[in-house]
Image (cartoon, rainbow, N blue to C red):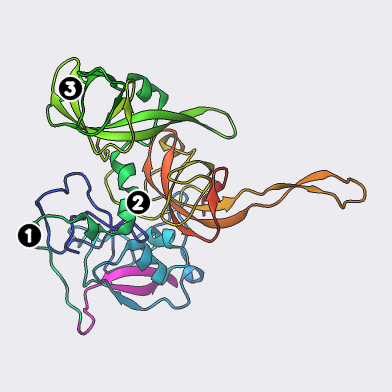
Amino acid sequence: MNRCLSGIITGMIAAAAVSGCVGPREIHDEQPVVAAQPVYRPVADPQPADKGNAHAVTTDDLQPSAPETYVVKKGDTLWDIAKRFLKNPWYWPEIWHDNPDIKNPHLIYPGDVISLYYVDGKPRLGINMKQVPGSTRLQPKIRTYPLDEKDVGIAIQAIKPFLIRPQVVAEETLESAPHVLDSREARLIYGSGDEVYVHGLDNAYAGQRFSVFRPGKKLLDPKTDELLGYEAIHASEAEVIREGEPATIELQDAVREVLRGDRLMPLDPGPQGFYFIPHAPASGTEGSIISLFDALSQVAQYQVAVVNLGQRDGMEPGHVFEVRQAGRTVVDHFDKDRKGREVTLPSEPSGLMMLFRTFDKVSYGLIMESSHPIGVGDIVTAP
């Protein structure tokens, strides 16, 4: 794929290792198409994949038009490949199996031939060693060249800010975050190019980069009123130019004014990596959308929302949820016996969401598909 890619974000996302991809890097000339679950070249009937809440895939789960073979191409995404074979892409991991003969079972490359076959009547997908006429198996090579960020696809730009900047912060994180003290000129408002003093950067080093943000509204659980965190309103990026206490930073690429008391967090994609494999959460998992980004009331495909489910609830990147519009409450004026009674309408499906970053109490989700507008209060359930 000739990109600084370490996998493919499902859907239309090209998953890029954003951190560090601003200059020349040593990368694979032909990167793997997806960081998939262990692939299988059929040599024997493997152990069943069904574990815990895994779904036992049957022929009913296959697309009517599912091909017998498919040659992986540059630009393919795991979500798109899975939809060629399956009605529900998140069942993809359930029909791949381990094969000890494969040195690295987590990679699928352009030129690989994905084959649909059956074991005891159950569908399986594997990598077939036999090449389709006219196809070429591309082997990884090493090449170094600068990355142009526009090459990594449109949707990665939608989630990049959420991978490297804080958008939601926990209460304890907010309380301990470094904060802006003042500037040399003692002004009240600061912008790009200004040098300001910051308290709490004791361990920072010259050249380290941060996001400057302002605490926003509280995020509460709609059922329990538990405080899940605060919105982090991004104001500027910053670079440490002098260590110490207080440290001195230079503001860069400000998108709004920086004020005294604004907080800092490192610009860091976090430890979760950029491999996103679509799979369903535990059966019965349910939550709610509690916040939207860059939208007043509703979002649609390739926009981001926050849900009130996190790592403590077993959430992990790649979990796919069905989004359902919460049923409105209406007044029935035509019931003869109970005029004026309130009736709650049923919830209706409106799209699919994939989690791409999880925290203790909340997670960020990207809307992969939407048939209707999606808003705060909508329900997310295991598909």
Q: Are marks 3 and 2 in contact (CB under 8 Å)?
A: no
| Residue pictured at 44% horizontal, 37% vertical | 362
- Left or right: where does residue 118 sit relative to residue 339? left
The label on residue 143 is 1
Point out the frontmost of discs 1 and 2. Answer: 2
Name which residue lies at 23% across and 34% down: 192
Q: Is residue 120 visible?
A: no
Q: Residues within 10 Å of mark 3 (few under 14, many from 20)?
A: many
Magenta stretch in the rendered image: 114-134
Q: Secondary structure at mark 1?
A: strand
- Circle 3/circle 1 CB separation < 8 Å: no
Identify which amino acid the numbered label 3 is placed on. Answer: Thr
Tell whether 106 sits left or right of 139.
right
Picture coordinates of residue 253 (x, y %)?
Answer: 24, 39
Residue at 16% across, 45% down: 20
Element marked by disc 2: helix
Residue 133 image offset from top left, x and y in percent: 21, 85
Is 123 one of the magenta-colored residues?
Answer: yes
Q: Which residue is mark 3?
A: 248
C-alpha span from label 3 to label 1:
38 Å
Q: Nearer the viewer, mark 3 or mark 2?
A: 3
With respect to residue 285, does 236 lie above or below? above
Please tell me which residue lies in front, 349 or 278: 349
Q: Nearer the viewer, residue 140 or 288?
A: 288
Rounded to the nearest whole Å, what is the CA distance between mark 1 and mark 2? 28 Å
Q: Are marks 1 and 2 in contact (CB under 8 Å)?
A: no
Mark 3–mark 2 Cα distance, whole angstroms, equals: 31 Å
Measured as percent of width and height from the top left, residue 163 is found at 30, 43
Mark toward the viewer: 3 or 1: 3
Q: Which mark is residue 19?
A: none
